[in-house]
Amino acid sequence: MAKNVARNVVVVGTQWGDEGKGKIVDWLTDHAKGVVRFQGGHNAGHTLVVGDKVYKLNLVPSGIVRDGVACFIGNGVVLDIHHLISEIRVLESGGIDVRSRLKVSPGCPLILPYHAALDHAREAAKCADARIGTTGKGIGPAYEDKVARRALRVYDLFHPDRFADKVKENLHYHNFVLTHYLGAEAVDFDALLAQAMSDAEEIRPLVADVSAALYAINKSGHNLLFEGAQGALLDIDHGTYPFVTSSNCVAGQAAAGSGIGPGMLHYVLGITKAYCTRVGGGPFPSELDIDTEGLPGHQMSQKGREFGTVTGRKRRCGWLDSAALKRSIQINGVTGLCITKLDVLDGLRELKICTGYRLDGRIVDLLPMGADEVAACEPILETLPGWSESTVGASTMAALPSTARDYLARIEALCDVPVDIVSTGPERGETIVRRHPLA
């Protein structure tokens, strides 16, 4: 008998996050044995709609709402264990079995109260134009400690004396910065230690060698999904620096952030909104006015319900930017695109796509690196006809208006990557499949 061959898919956002990755990961888990989070922290916000239930996830992988699917938090995730426990309890109260299916890498760096305190104090100390728009959850400072080799990791929790000594040393440093430099309050050692030790006992049964578990699943011929958080244009190396997140969001991080080799990654699915959004500060060449009623940006904001899952802040909206999308396709090695929220554009008489920029007297068709260069870009817009018919719930390409099909075809032509999936609503069944990544 021929052995089953595993096919593993990395799901990444190709814009500035909030592209609808959660729904697609949930939809794909019908063909997968396990789902892995490999970077970021609880600054991620994945919303899933299953029947009449809505699930909002920050740390737990989106596969958790599918019975029998194993879920993993890899070593590339910075972990607030107190938040994780709270999230698990919320899911359990909704009837989801979590603890028997979720495993956490012992290598995850911990987010501790002093990280969140630093995050808030630093952002408050900046002038408005310099603010990154951080969620204030301590993700950035936790990654800083990891790179500075002073992070505490999940495995430290189970050695109380060692953990206490390391926390005391870190607090000596961080409390000095908080009180003397940032004018904020110090973090209390005793309260931190008591909470961490209490949480450690609750999380202990979930801790496992994630790398070994993923190799075993792959060797047995079962499929895996690797779920990215944020979007590629927020990547710490390749995004609009410094208006970026603190981790690598690109597909290559799936290997490093979960402890497997890149040869185990077979297909990269790039999740792309039919338009663009961005939360927080940073340049946005195709940005539109979202406050004036009757304008396209206002429709995107209101019809698309463009409010951050984690922060509740209004998302900035703009036309699809193919020059930015091409950069994202390049740095992720995208195999195929999934276009989401196509229905938000229903009723617009005409649409525009940003196909490139005027920058310092020349025309460029690829997003440049760094915020300063991107901020200097003047968008070049191509106009296409819109459609008046509804695309909500369409499950075949033939069910779409011809101009909607033309819009998708133009995205393919500009980016030289096929549109394999189109999402036409939040429900699992509201999906058009042209080529299944796991089939």
Image (spheres, rainbow, N blue to C red):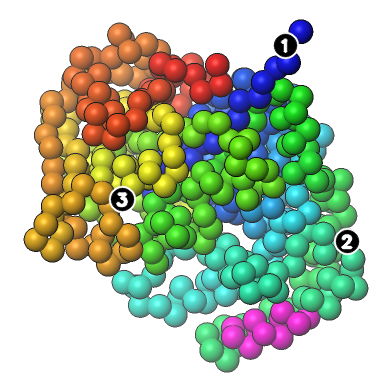
Residue occupied by mark 3: 316
Give the secondary structure at mark 1.
loop
Mark linked to residue 122: none
- 3 or 2: tag closer to the N-terminus: 2
Q: Nearer the viewer, residue 193 or 333?
A: 333
Q: Secondary structure at mark 3?
A: strand
From the viewer's perspective, is the residue at label 1 or at label 3 nearer? 1
Q: Could you say which disc has been placed on residue 158 in the image?
A: 2
Amino acid type, mark 3: Arg
Q: Is residue 420 visible?
A: yes
Q: Which residue is mark 1?
A: 2
- Report if the CB atoms under discs 2 and 1 are less than 8 Å apart: no
Among the two numbered marks 1 and 3 on one chain, the one whose residue lies closer to the N terminus: 1
The mark closer to the camera, 2 or 1, is 1
- At x 18%, y 51%, the residue is 364
Inter-mark Cα distance, 3 to 2? 43 Å
Compared to residue 50, the image places residue 87 above or below, namely below
- Three-letter amino acid code of the residue under disc 2: Phe
Chain part drawn in magenta: 168-178
Identify residue type, mark 1. Answer: Ala
x 44%, y 39%: residue: 333
Q: What is the spatial separation of the Cα atoms under label 2 and label 1, in whole angstroms?
A: 44 Å
Q: In terms of depth relative to the viewer, which is nearer, 365 or 384?
A: 365
